[in-house]
Image (cartoon, rainbow, N blue to C red):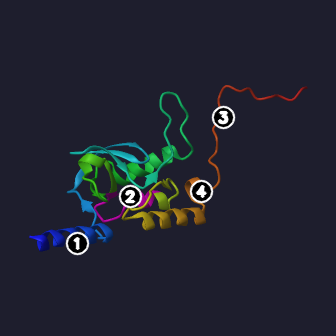
Amino acid sequence: MQILIMAAVLAAAITATTSITVAVAPARSESVLVKAVLDGDTIEVQLYGRVRLIGIEAPRIGRGGAASAPFANAARDRLTSLVLRRFVRLETDDAPLAVRRGAYVMTEDGQCVNTILLREGLARVSARPPQARLPELQHAEAEARTSRRGIWGAPPPIPSTGYTRKKTPPT
């Protein structure tokens, strides 16, 4: 009996002191239809509802009269062109999609939409380890920065306010 107790204690001690890293393949959903694009990093899909693209942060769209951040509309428009009314697969790192409501969005031809937005300079990395695609996301952002695309390039033109009067030279 004492041998069994000692074996159990020894096994527990070994388990507690040994850390084993296991690479787990990301979970992928069945194909789901994208019903709406809410902003540059949030979509609404059939079955799951609102899903945020994890690992990225797109500029915010103004709500309730607030002005949108530069490139917010461009990010939303690009995401719309990539996924709206199309079937995509949602890939998660660890938690089930129904709990987390965040995913990597994969097109039917296997491209990661999160990475596309980063590569085009329409979002920035906001991921923290451990995330399966973090190196891929960071590389895509670095490409955009180097090429000065989107938010990493020249500032966008600021439209006139419409209520300021042009000064006329004295005559």
Residue type, numbered disc 1: Leu
Magenta segment range?
105-117
Which badge, 2 or 1, is on the more N-terminal residue? 1
Image quadrant containing the N terminus: bottom left
Are the residues at dot 2 and dot 4 in contact (C-beta closer than 8 Å)? no
Residue type, numbered disc 4: Trp
Residue 30, quarter of picture:
bottom left
Which badge, 3 or 4, is on the more N-terminal residue? 4
Compute the Cα span from label 2 to label 4.
Answer: 19 Å
Q: Secondary structure at mark 3?
A: loop
Between circles 1 and 3, the one closer to the viewer is 1
Identify the residue at image location x=42%, y=63%: 134
Residue type, numbered disc 3: Ser
Instruction: Identify the mark at residue 152; answer none if there is no mark.
Output: 4
Q: Which residue is mark 3?
A: 160
Which badge, 1 or 4, is on the more N-terminal residue? 1
Between circles 3 and 4, the one closer to the viewer is 4
Identify the residue at image location x=12%, y=71%: 2
**Residue 25 x, y percent position in the rendering:** 27, 67
Which badge, 2 or 4, is on the more N-terminal residue? 2
Image quadrant containing the C terminus: top right
Compute the Cα span from label 3 to label 4.
Answer: 23 Å
Are the residues at dot 3 and dot 2 in contact (C-beta closer than 8 Å)? no
Instruction: Identify the mark at residue 113; answer none if there is no mark.
Output: 2
Which badge, 3 or 2, is on the more N-terminal residue? 2
Q: Which residue is mark 1?
A: 10
Give the camera-side residue of 149 and 138: 138
Q: Give yes or no for residue 93 being in the magenta stretch.
A: no
Q: Is residue 48 visible?
A: yes
**Residue 80 x, y percent position in the rendering:** 39, 48
